[in-house]
Image (cartoon, grey):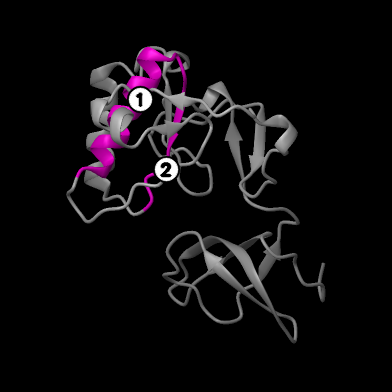
Amino acid sequence: PAGKLPKILNALRIEGTNTAGQPVALTAEVQQLLGDHRVRAVAMSGTDGLVRGMEALDTGAPISVPVGEATLGRIFNVLGEPVDEQGPVNASTTAPIHRSAPKLTELETKPKVFETGIKVIDLLAPYRQGGKVGLFGGAGVGKTVLIQELINNIAKEHGGVSVFGGVGERTREGNDLYEEFKDSGVINAEDLSKSKVALC
């Protein structure tokens, strides 16, 4: 509503025309309330054509993305929109990108080693099942290759599914990864519901 500030993490929708008369559509996420009816927001796509005075509408909720089996084998942008030219996603459920962590009572209490199938990792730096792991390294050292191998092993040895978030990945690397997943059978191009990964 007019005169009311959106909540932090809400999605703002900005639509209008630029000075050349071309349509502009942008989603932004509120990060900070600055006072004086102003907010600081992060744009989720390019800001070309954005001009002062465009109307920003509060959607009343955070960005939500499709979830469930319908997302397997598909590629999404940060807004949860499919970018793989395979049509809309038939997901019956969406979930906000900002959610509370699972309660401690919902987590496994006994530590268990997760077998990755990569001997060096399993021996020298084993991963805890259900835990979090970060991979840090410079460009070209093999982080994506390692993740790709982990996803492949999880799918084939454990029957699990994975979500790959390619933050900062080049388009070429994303395309290569997608093709390699199809070649290895992790993404089943004929029947996407049998795929073992979703890509963002």
In this view of the protein, which residue sits in the foreground, 22 or 181? 181
In this view of the protein, which residue sits in the foreground, 10 or 162? 162
Q: Amino acid at mark 2?
A: Gly
Residue segment shown in magenta: 142-167
In this view of the protein, which residue sits in the foreground, 159 or 115? 115
Q: At x 41% / y 40%, what residue is drawn?
A: 83
Q: Quadrant of the C terminus?
A: top left
Q: At x 38% / y 51%, what residue is drawn?
A: 167
Q: Secondary structure at mark 1?
A: loop
Does 132 lie within the magenta span? no
Q: Quadrant of the N terminus?
A: bottom right
Residue 137: image tag:
none
Task: Estimate the spatial distance between the alpha carbons at disc 1 and disc 2, rounded to whole Å.
Answer: 19 Å
- In front: label 1 or label 2: 1
Instruction: Say above or below: 104 vs 10.
Output: above
Compare marks 1 and 2 and give the one earlier in the sequence. 1
Quarter-of-image position of residue 69: top right
Residue 190: % across, % down: 36, 12
Q: Amino acid at mark 1?
A: Thr
Residue 111: % across, % down: 55, 29
Left or right of 86, for residue 65:
right
Q: At x 41% / y 70%, what residue is drawn?
A: 48
* Extreme residue toward the left, this view: 140
Q: Secondary structure at mark 2?
A: loop
Tag 2 residue? 165
Residue 185: % across, % down: 30, 16
Residue 116: image tag:
1
Badge 2, how many Cα within 10 Å: few under 14, some, many 20+? some
